[in-house]
Every structure is written in C-alpha cells, then in structure tokens.
Image: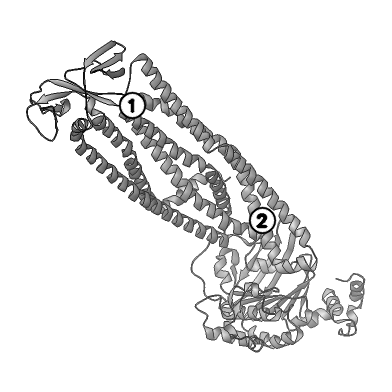
C-alpha cells in the first residue's frame, strides 16, 4: 500500500473541507440531540414518576402544585418557596403493587417493603420499622401524580424537539457528507485521468490498458466508499462514542471509568484486523485489475481467439484468475464473519456484566446506591455505545479495501509524468536535423550515431528490416523518448529545450493501423478542434480521395463510427486517418507504413494527392513497399540502428547495395531495373546474404 495514503486522502478531503466541516458539525449536533433522550428519561423517572416518594408537607395554600387528600393540602418539599411555612410531613410509598399514605415522617425508605392490615413494614440494614399506613385508591394516587403531569408533558415536548433536531441533522449530515465525497472523488478521477495523459508513452508499454482502467474506475469507486460509508460511520461512531462517554461520566463518574476499557479493545482489534485484511485486499484488488486486463485483451483480440480456436485456453486463464479472486474474497468473508457482531456482542456482554457486578456489590455493602432514573439512563446510554461500535467494526472491511485501492491510485499518480505547458509556438518551417544521435530503450542501443538533415518541403524515407530503428527515429522526433547522445533540432532549435506539446502542435502522423474514436467521421478528422471547420474537414477528405469512397455511407461524413471504426474497411479507416493529419496542416508529416493496408487502386488514388499535400511540409515516410517512395528526396537505409546507405531511389539502385537487393526481392528479378555494372560485386554479396 502507498506509504502516504492517509496524508494524500486528507489533502483531497480538504478540497471540500467546508461541506465536510458542515457535515461533521451537523453530526455532532445530531448526536447531542439524540443523547438528550436518556437524560430526559432520567429526569422524568427521578423528578416526576418516582418523586411522589419524596417528603410532602401540609400547606394551607392550594395551587397547581398541591395535592388535595382527605380535606387537607400537601406539597412536595422541594417545591416550597423560600420562607414558605411547611406543615406536617407525610410520605407516599410503594409496597409491591400498592401505594400507601403515611401521616408522618419515615426514617429509612430503602429495604424490603410489605403492607398488611394497615401497617407498612420496611426491613432495612438498620433494622425493621413499622408505620401506620392507609392504602390509596387509584383516584387518590392520581391526585398525588397530577402535579407531575405538566413537568412530564414539558419533558415529552423537549424529547420530540430534540428528536426533530436529530432527524434534520441526520439528513443534513448524510447529504453534505455524500456530496463532499462526490466532489472529492470527482476531483480524484479528473486528476488520475489528467495524470494518465501526462504519463510517458513507454509507461503504457509495461502496464496493460485494463489495469489502468481498473485504477480509474474500480479503485476510485472504492475510495468513494471510504468517504461516504467508512468516513460517515467512523466519524459518527467516534463522535457518538465521545458523546456517550460524556453522558456516562455525567451520570456516574465511577461507571464512566469502568466502561473506558472498551476503547483499547477496539483500537487493538482494528490493528489486528487490518494486519490480515490488508494482505488479502491487496491481492483482491490486484486480481480484479488483472481480470479487467484479460477481459480488455480478449475483447480486442476476439477474432484471433476464435480463428485459432483458443476459446478454451482463454477461458481457463480467466477462470484461474477468477478462482484466485474468489479464494481471497472468501478469506476476507471468513475474517469478517469471525469479527463484527461477534466482537461487539462479547464487549457488550462484558460491559453489562461489569455494571451488574458493580451494582450487585453496591447492594451488598449498602453503599453507593444510585437512583432508578440514573440506572435506566446509564443502561440506555451504555446500549447506545455499541451502536456506533457495531457500525465501525462492520466498516473495517470497507475501510481496508478503500485504503488499499487508494494506495494503488496514488501509486499510479506518483509515476513521473511529463510537464504540460500551456500555449503554443508559431508554426515552424520544418527543417529537421539529427546530429550523432544514439538511443537505447533499456541497455542496448537501437540507434547508433544517426546523422541526417531534412529540409522544408523534402520527403525523407526510412527503410530497413524490422528492428532496424525506423520507428525509433519517429519516436525521438515526437519526443516520446529523448536520446542518450546527440541532438535533434527543428529549425535549429534543440527539441529537448522546447515543451513537448509545442513541438507536436505542428506535427501530424498517419499510422499503419489507424485509430478511430467513437463519434462520426467528421469528429474523427477534426478531433473536436474548434479551429478546424466543417469545410476544412470536407476539403481534407476530398484531397486524400476519401469523398468518393465514403459517398456510399447514408449520412456521409456524419456517419457514426463505432469503436475503432470496425464498420469501415481498412482502406476507409486509413483515408480518414490521412484526412485527420492533413486537416491539422502540420509542418512535419509522418507516414508510418501509411499505405500498407490500402489496396493498389486506393493507393494510386491518394498517391497523386500526397504529392500535392507534401509540398511545403517536411515529410517522413516509413515504408516497406519501396514502390511508394520512388519520388522521395532522400532515402535512408537502416540496418541494426545505423544508416548504411542514403540517397535518392536512382542513386541507391546504382549502388547495388541493400536497397537494390530489397527492391529486387519485392518486384522480382525479372521486373527489377538492370543492375549497373559497377555494382556487380556488391550485388553478388547481397544475393548470398539477402536482407
């Protein structure tokens, strides 16, 4: 996993910090509002429902807070105003399901209570005490509860108010957190895609397209889960736990300290879990990337797979990857099955056992007994502690998967890219010169001491066997790579001193295997460049002779082009590629085996157009069909990375060397031009060792 994944994710989170902060504030407010419930219940129980067991005193002034019983008025002791006279003390106590009226004070109310024959017996640690008592009827009991009803209704009102706040905050938190996550992932995807555009061409030689696609789609989607599900659960979990512990300490400090043991257990569990999960998830994400790669490769090579009947072998290769993916997914499932609810249930049971033990020992010693309201609130709050813990533990799998995916994304973004320079340069003349250029892709030099000059308007042809270095020269000219030795200049300027985008701005290329994008024929010629008008597109197609070949299409140049132009013939695709290069009016034009896939009739059609189009621009032609380069101003014959012959078509034939031998082999000895007498010895050697 990427070493600084956490820092990188935090940096991206800061791009939407305002909405994230708003979401977290709403989360905190919502948690506080939700945790108000147990406190309201505590006050409802202790201050109202059980409060009738507090001392009452007789009073002569009736009010809403007084109780009328047996022609006398009584009021709870804590409701007397300062200086107000308190009369005779009385008590209302519960024994089983019976409430009784005692006309006098009671010394000890804790202990076992029983009522029989007008006597209330209280058996406590200090001894047994008996008090004359009168059983209350339902209406008499309600009279003692009646002053509590306004307070209870007020607390119920507060409860619903806090509930409404919690609902609004939950909605706001979910909305802002997810919208923030979407903004972050949008920026991350844009940055990843932009970085892919800046990566050097040789990077894609070593990484299959399917794996790159997996980084941009699957891995960033997993990072989205991190911000939406994981971040939400962990932040809400942490804030909930903080709120719960504050509530626990407010209710009872000793029980709050007792329940702190949950924190180190959760931390230790997260560390141990991730130790195993990271290993599995790294393999899982890698296998998913490989599966995408093999699917991409299989679709692109489907015709070859079927022609050579490799369906079974391809299926087995895919099945092996898929089986390994499933095997490690099952390992993750086993790990998750052993954790989550099991862990939470154990901790929950342990917590309640400790609380019960604490209360049990307190009951035995007779010390530290707390009110029923506090006990209810404590159990309620303690139960709420495990809701966020369950959410956090259940998100551990998503957390680890997201972190591994984020690491893969940031590892890709750490790959050194090419600097993108805005702006451009004036259209250069196109005088190209290679001076003692040597180049190696890895260790061995594929170009050795290459020197030549191509002036504006000239056509330079590069010929030679496969691997002789023809394409490497073009790669250097486009600055897909830079040479280890020597210099390449355009109009006298060293191209390594110019931004790559500026150089390529005035270059055009036609490849042997043209690449067409999904869209229309017109969009493939202009590539969406606003500077190229529809008229320019039509003119470019007409200049290369494509108008006549494409006239059978129902929508003309607006004909849809599906992936790679599979509905068009090879010749039609190549003509569109020609038109694309010419529409951009390049100063330097490269034709890389451009006529190799075009039939003889089509080739003849565009050959005359090319002669016109090459005027005023420097043209490089890589060709195996030597008949297409007869008119070249300069032909460079390459062999093992060196220029072994150079000259015009006639001059090279006159030399009788490699070029002559290649020409003779292509046309057949009967059709070849007569061998000059002075080239006899060279030709004989070439015949023995044909190229």
Q: Which of 502 and 240 is in front in this view?
A: 240
Instruction: Examine the image and state in which quarter residue 651 appears.
Output: bottom right
Mark 2 or 1, nearer chain start: 1
For the C terminus, the image quarter is bottom right
Q: Residue furthest top?
A: 127
Q: Mark on residue 45?
A: none
Q: Is residue 533 above or below residue 126?
A: below
SS for tag 2? helix
Q: Nearer the viewer, residue 530 or 243?
A: 243
Q: In this view, does 329 lie above or below 261?
A: below
Tell me the mark number nearer the camera, choosing from 2 and 1.
Answer: 1
In the image, taking residue 107 as reference, residue 580 lies left or right, namely: right
Q: Residue furthest front?
A: 117
Please indicate, yes or no, whether residue 656 appears anywhere in the rendered image: no
Pinpoint residue 276: horizontal percent, then vertical percent: 60, 38
In the image, taking residue 202 as reference, residue 2 lies left or right, namely: left
Please indicate, yes or no, whether residue 100 appears anywhere in the rendered image: yes
Residue pictured at 88% horizontal, 78% vertical:
679
Residue pictured at 64% horizontal, 81% vertical:
457
- For label 1, the residue is 252
Residue pictured at 89% horizontal, 74% vertical:
682
Q: In this view, does 302 lie above or below 80?
A: below
- For label 2, the residue is 291
Instruction: Examine the image and state in which quarter residue 367 appears.
Output: top left
């Amino acid at each position: 996993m990427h070493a600084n994944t956490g820092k990188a994710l935090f940096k991206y989170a800061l791009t939407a910090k305002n909405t994230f902060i708003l979401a977290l504030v709403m989360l905190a407010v919502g948690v506080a509002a939700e945790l108000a419930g147990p406190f309201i219940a505590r006050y409802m129980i202790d201050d109202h429902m059980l409060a009738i067991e507090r001392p009452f005193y007789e009073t002569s002034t009736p009010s809403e807070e007084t109780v009328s019983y047996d022609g006398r008025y009584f009021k709870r002791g804590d409701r007397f105003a300062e200086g107000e006279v308190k009369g005779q003390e009385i008590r209302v106590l519960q024994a089983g399901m019976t409430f009784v009226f005692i006309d006098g004070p009671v010394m000890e109310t804790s202990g076992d209570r029983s009522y029989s024959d007008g006597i209330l017996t209280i058996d406590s640690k200090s001894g047994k005490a008996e008090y004359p008592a009168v059983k209350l009827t339902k209406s008499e009991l309600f009279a003692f509860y009646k002053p509590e009803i306004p307070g209870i209704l007020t607390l119920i009102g507060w409860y619903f108010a806090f509930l409404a706040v919690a609902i609004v905050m939950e909605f706001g938190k979910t909305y802002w957190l997810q919208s923030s996550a979407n903004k972050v992932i949008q920026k991350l995807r844009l940055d990843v895609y932009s970085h892919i555009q800046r990566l050097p061409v040789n990077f894609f030689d070593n990484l299959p397209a399917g794996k790159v696609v997996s980084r941009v789609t699957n891995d960033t989607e997993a990072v989205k889960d991190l911000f939406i599900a994981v971040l939400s659960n962990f932040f809400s979990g942490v804030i909930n736990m903080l709120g719960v512990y504050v509530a626990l300490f407010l209710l009872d400090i000793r029980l709050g300290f007792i329940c702190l043991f949950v924190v180190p257990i959760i931390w230790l569990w997260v560390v141990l879990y991730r130790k195993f999960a990271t290993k599995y998830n790294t393999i899982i994400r890698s296998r998913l990337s490989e599966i995408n790669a093999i699917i991409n490769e299989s679709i692109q090579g489907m015709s070859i797979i079927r022609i050579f009947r490799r369906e079974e072998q391809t299926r087995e290769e895919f099945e092996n990857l898929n089986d390994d993916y499933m095997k490690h997914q099952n390992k993750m499932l086993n790990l998750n099955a052993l954790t989550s609810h099991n862990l939470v249930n154990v901790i929950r049971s342990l917590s309640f056992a400790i609380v019960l033990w604490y209360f049990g020992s307190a009951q035995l010693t007779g010390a530290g007994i707390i009110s029923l309201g506090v006990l209810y609130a404590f159990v309620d709050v303690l139960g709420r502690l495990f809701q966020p813990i369950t959410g956090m533990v259940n998100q551990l799998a998503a957390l680890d998967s997201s972190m591994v995916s984020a690491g893969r994304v940031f590892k890709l973004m750490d790959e050194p890219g090419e600097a993108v320079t805005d702006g451009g340069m004036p259209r250069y003349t196109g005088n190209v010169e290679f001076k003692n250029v040597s180049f190696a892709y890895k260790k061995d030099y594929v170009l050795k001491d290459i020197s030549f000059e191509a002036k504006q308007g000239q056509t330079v042809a590069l010929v030679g066997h496969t691997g002789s270095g023809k394409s490497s020269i073009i790669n250097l000219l486009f600055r897909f790579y830079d040479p280890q030795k020597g210099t390449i200049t355009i109009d006298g300027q060293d191209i390594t001193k110019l931004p790559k985008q500026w150089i390529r701005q005035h270059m055009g290329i036609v490849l042997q295997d043209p690449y067409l994008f999904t869209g229309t024929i017109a969009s493939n010629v202009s590539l969406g460049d606003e500077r190229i008008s529809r008229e320019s597109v039509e003119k470019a197609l007409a200049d290369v002779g494509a108008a006549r070949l494409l006239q059978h299409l129902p929508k003309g140049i607006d004909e849809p082009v599906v992936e790679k132009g599979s509905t068009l013939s090879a010749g039609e695709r190549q003509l569109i590629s020609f038109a694309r290069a010419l529409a951009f009016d390049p100063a330097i034009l490269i034709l890389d085996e451009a006529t190799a896939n075009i039939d003889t009739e089509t080739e003849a059609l565009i050959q005359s157009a090319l002669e016109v189009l090459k005027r005023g621009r420097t043209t490089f032609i890589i060709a195996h069909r030597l008949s297409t380069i007869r008119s070249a101003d300069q032909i460079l014959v390459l062999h093992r990375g060196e220029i072994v012959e150079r000259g015009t078509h006639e001059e090279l034939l006159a030399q009788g060397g490699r070029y002559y031998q290649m020409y003779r082999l292509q046309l057949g000895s009967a059709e070849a031009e007569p061998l000059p007498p002075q080239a006899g010895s060279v030709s004989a050697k070439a015949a023995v060792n044909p190229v």
